[in-house]
Amino acid sequence: MLEKEFKMTKKQNYIWKNDRNFALDRYEKQQYYYVAEANDLITKARHDLTARELKIMDFVISKIKPDDEHFTTIKTSMYELTNVLNLKKSGTTYSQLAKTLDDLRAKSVVIVNENEERRSITQTGWLTSSTYWENGQVELELAKQLAPYLLSLKNNYTQYLLIDTVKLKSKYAILLYKLMRECDKDKGKTIAILQGTPEEFREWLGAPKEYTYGQFKQNILTKAVEEINLKIEDMDLEIFQGRYNRKVVQVEIHNNWTSKSIEEY
């Protein structure tokens, strides 16, 4: 029995022999880096990422420089990842992060591309490789198919602070937060409004297909709105519904926070 427990412990921490800090002077600043991505990656991408996977991808994307013309190797460390993402620093956490990074290589994202000439669908993974050293260093390579949605962004893109998505626990809150940022066209000068049908909202947030709108609103949408309102300083979200013959046919999320409201306060 003792031998079995020893083997399990050894396997769990199989690589993390020496936790060196490669980013002590940077990780707090990293939380305040911007994440910039094309709007299509927010509104037209379909995936099944968990909250932690969404945060890690935001972390990786935040390391892309505005003037980068091609992807370079993302160099980081388990120490930086745990600190930026506010996770407990331990061998167990490091092993869990390594598994999450492996999952990001395996999981796919489907992006619908529509223009006046033709419609296409891009399907790709998020990462093509992830390399770890026993001292805690990590190197990641982004899938090249994501380049049009993350590099040289001039128009039709959204940016937000990494620390905002780090604060949120629910994947639905993270996805709704990004949608609200995307529809804020004047940076808080007026009320931002996200409009869609119940079906579109369920698709945007990746809700279980068997959910009715009532279940979706109760279990996902309302809870996501409540979490965002609690944790994001410049968001005060409110749900509105349009009905036809008692059936909800239109949903709107208003962000009642504006820069003008701060001035009035």
Image (spheres, rainbow, N blue to C red):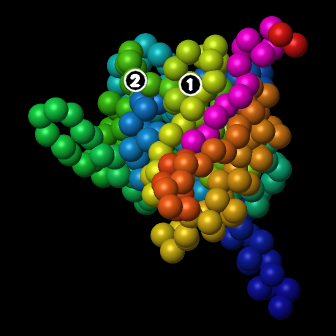
Amino acid type shown at disc 2: Asn
The image's mark for residue 150 is none
Q: Residues within 10 Å of mark 1 (few under 14, many from 20)?
A: some
Q: Is residue 73 left or right of residue 91?
A: left
> x and y percent of residue 263 in the render?
80, 8
Q: Residue at x 61, y 40 (%)?
A: 253
For the residue labelled by badge 1, is the local secondary structure a helix, a strand or a loop?
loop
> x and y percent of residue 57 in the render?
55, 42
Q: Residue at x 54, y 54 (%)?
A: 243
Image height of 85 relative to 256, above or below: below
Magenta-colored span:
252-263
Residue corresponding to mark 1: 184
Q: Residue at x 35, y 52 (%)?
A: 110
Q: Residue at x 82, y 40 (%)?
A: 230
Q: Quadrant of residue 145?
A: top left
Cα distance between the residues tagged 2 and 1: 12 Å
Amino acid type shown at disc 1: Asp
> x and y percent of residue 114 in the render?
24, 39
Tell whether position 41 is magenta: no
Q: Is residue 209 left or right of residue 99?
A: left
Tell whether position 257 is magenta: yes
Q: Is residue 109 left or right of residue 24?
A: left
Q: Is residue 228 left or right of residue 191?
A: right
Quadrant where the image shows the C terminus: top right
Mark closest to the chain's N terminus, 2 or 1: 2
The image's mark for residue 156 is 2
Quadrant where the image shows the N terminus: bottom right
Q: Quadrant of residue 97?
A: bottom right
